Amino acid sequence: MNQTFTTSQKWKQFLIILLPILITQISLSAITFFDTNMSGHYSPQDLAGVAIGASLWVPIQTGLSGILMGITPIVSQLIGSGRKSDVRFNVIQALYFAVTIAIFILLVGSFIIGPVLEFMSLEDRVQSVAYYFLCAISFGVIPLFGYTVLRNFMDSLGQTRITMIITLISLPINILLNYLLIFGQLGFPRLGGVGAGVASACTYWIIFFISIVVVHRIHPFAEYGIFRKWHGPSIRKWKELLTIGIPIGFAIFFETSVFSAVTLLMSSFDTATIAAHQAALNFASTLYMIPLSISMALTILVGFEVGAKRLQDAKKYSIIGIGSAVTLSLLTAVVLIVFGKQVAGIYSTDPLVISLIQHFLVYAIFFQISDAVATPVQGSLRGYKDVSPAFIITFIAFWVIGLPVGFITATYTTLGPYGYWIGLIVGLGFGAFALLWRLVRIQRKYNQKLTSK
């Protein structure tokens, strides 16, 4: 990354950082998308099973990956302040931490997956697919978290194009493995939705090994010698990673886990409604990759400028990022309005399921517009290492406001399952306003600090 002096230079650097992140995030999201989509073409029960399994896995994965994102502002500010020699130690500690988290989640998951699925009172086939899908994908947890750390390190250097290439290589491999294992092609076992879990786990191992080779051998990552000298675990550094990462991870977890809570609450509806809800949510999650990618780009750029004490430049990047997200959200809203039926048809050939998906997508429009404000603002705040308030705001927005409003609307009005989406829209709207207010405050605080020196 380089210092920029004009708005056009900032736009150029913003796009250079953003576009590869966006492609990477869409590709990573596409792994879950193709798991769900291809399982849906196997049977509605496999669609529902994989969708429910994914709805339980994704909040855990994104929340814990969010904790590991704490390394991004740390490395960005180290580079911005010229302390490149400290980078290797921080990355190694993050890798140790990633493996520890992965082992912990595997142990916990082995005890709770069965009881959670039993609680949902699903059809036997749906429950079986969800259970074995989660068992299969668990074999990829350790490499996925290890890749997350290495990816954040590479992105922190502004080399987002490299992680894009790694992910793009993995996507066709995942699709091919899905094809072979879901449908039993070319002599492979016909596993249905469970095969999607096996395929994803294999894909996670592939991208982890590729990223190790890249970090060890390719310029400019090789200059940091990440794997040339090993350090013992440092509790002090883990504490710093936790201090920054836990609020990030929990903020993401609160947002993603609320959808799992909604899925649990919706288990009383029929399989077609559950499948349609999860399909619409899967597509909305794919659209979410746009503001999420902008958020990640802002963390890198704002962190770099804050580390160099160029606060006005950091503020300008925030404006560019938030404005871009809102504009793109309005464009995707138009796409959903015009092509809603075609989008629904991607997920199923069942006319009833298609109709239900199309209805859910109407609510997704309003949800993703609010996301376009809230998510990039969080990315800017992370660049300032201001993470705890966002964690509190996100919890209130989704769990104190969104879920209760959704439950009341779904239970005591004729809207039924759509009431949950209304509650989430209300919660996210509150969160977007509160997070924006916090960003304005933290920018003023940093300016006052600088001028007082």
Image (cartoon, rainbow, N blue to C red):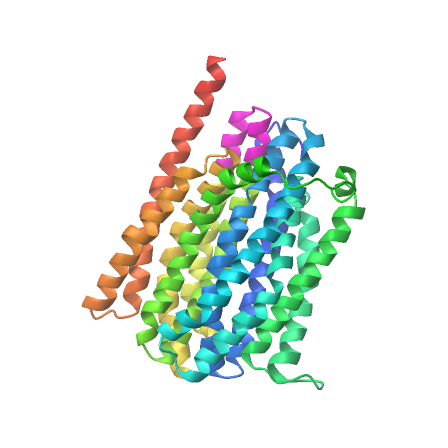
Asked if residue 408 is positioned above or below residue 269 in the image, the reply reads above
Which residue is more in the foreground, 313 or 154? 154
Q: Residue 61 vs residue 86: left or right?
A: left
Residue 308 on the magenta segment = yes
Q: Residue at x 40, y 43 (%)?
A: 391
Place of residue 328 in the rendered image (x, y in percent of width and height, measured from the top left) = 48, 51
Which residue is more in the foreground, 264 or 313? 264
Image quadrant holding the N terminus, namely top right
Q: Is residue 323 visible?
A: no
Which residue is more in the foreground, 173 or 63? 63
Q: Residue at x 66, y 53 (%)?
A: 164
Q: Residue 54 vs residue 166: left or right?
A: left
Residue 169 on the magenta segment = no
Place of residue 267 in the rendered image (x, y in percent of width and height, measured from the top left) = 34, 73
Q: Is residue 264 visible?
A: yes
Asked if residue 253 is positioned above or below residue 263 in the image, the reply reads above
Q: Main secondary structure of the magenta part?
A: helix
Q: Residue at x 35, y 48 (%)?
A: 395
Magenta region: 301-320
Q: How many marks?
A: 0
Place of residue 366 in the rendered image (x, y in percent of width and height, measured from the top left) = 36, 57
Query: Extreme left residue here?
Result: 412
Which residue is more in the foreground, 448 or 226? 226
Place of residue 239 in the rendered image (x, y in percent of width and height, measured from the top left) = 53, 38
Asked if residue 201 is positioned above or below residue 351 in the image, the reply reads above
